[in-house]
Amino acid sequence: MAQKSKSKSDLAVKPYPNLTREAYNEIRRLIFLNELRPGQKVAYRKMAQRLGMSLTPVVQALKHMEFMGLLQHEPNRGFYIKPIVPQEVSEAYDLRELLESKMIPKIIVRLDEDGQRRLKGALEDYIQAGHTGSLKLRLAKDMNFHMTLAEISQQSITIWMLRYLLDFLYLRFEKEMIFSRPQESSAAEHRRIYDCVMERNPRAARKAMRDHIRSIKSNVLEDLHNRLSETEEIEI
């Protein structure tokens, strides 16, 4: 039976999921570049026009981000980037510490030659990114190092949760707060995690991971409190 040929108009139609993903990535990019900041309204009608799509996929992307905790919706007003709250920062990093330290034993058990090669490459890429001066590249390579570790564990649900959590953290809190520490300190912490995993020492590796995440958390909270204090002084 001959297959019915598709018209040009059929081929030109994109399914909603693809458009929603495109809209999500665009909003994500704007947040990452600080073009959308805490408290700012998302002009989704203009965004839909600029992307050449209907409102439906853009609103679907915004609702997904609302579900993730990145946006808040106010009836009859629209979507806004949520303001940053210190308690939220603390909870997010506590959860990250729990997830990443929990995976360490499985990472070590399932670390084969391919995993060793991938992990070494991820560490070298991160260290190299620190020499470029690009926060965006450094962020990408930092996420890649931690996700490479997670993927070695083969714990699919935990990997999924960590991927969403990292996306939330790096979009929700400005990248300058995350990376305001000296690169040498952060690189040394990553190398310590790597060395402990390669030595197949779960206790030391878990400690290295916890110390690393707690250091980031402390740094972000300190910077956030300083920024909030500066804002209060200006308002007074």
Image (cartoon, grey):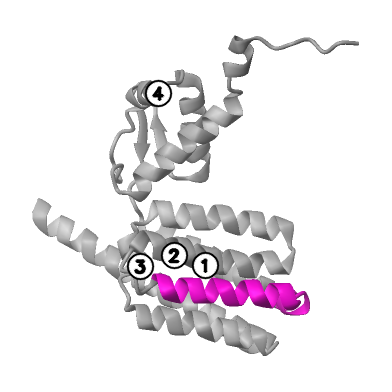
In this view, the mark in front (4 or 2) = 4
Pointer 1 residue = 94
Asked if the residue under mark 2 is in contact with the one under mark 1, i.e. CB atoms within 8 Å, the reply is yes
The Cα–Cα distance between marks 4 and 2, rounded to whole angstroms, is: 35 Å
Residue on which disc 4 sits: 48
Task: State the extent of the magenta-drawn residues as a range.
Answer: 105-129
Q: Which residue is mark 2?
A: 90
| Residue contact at pointers 3 and 4, CB within 8 angstroms | no
User: Which amino acid type is shown beneath numbered disc 2?
Assistant: Ser
Horizontal and vertical percent for residue 196? 62, 87
Q: Amino acid at mark 4?
A: Ala
Residue at 56% x, 52% y: name it.
164
Give the amino acid at mark 1: Asp
Residue at x 65% of width, y 9% of height: 7
Q: Percent x, y for residue 108? A: 72, 79
| Residue 111 part of the magenta-drawn span | yes
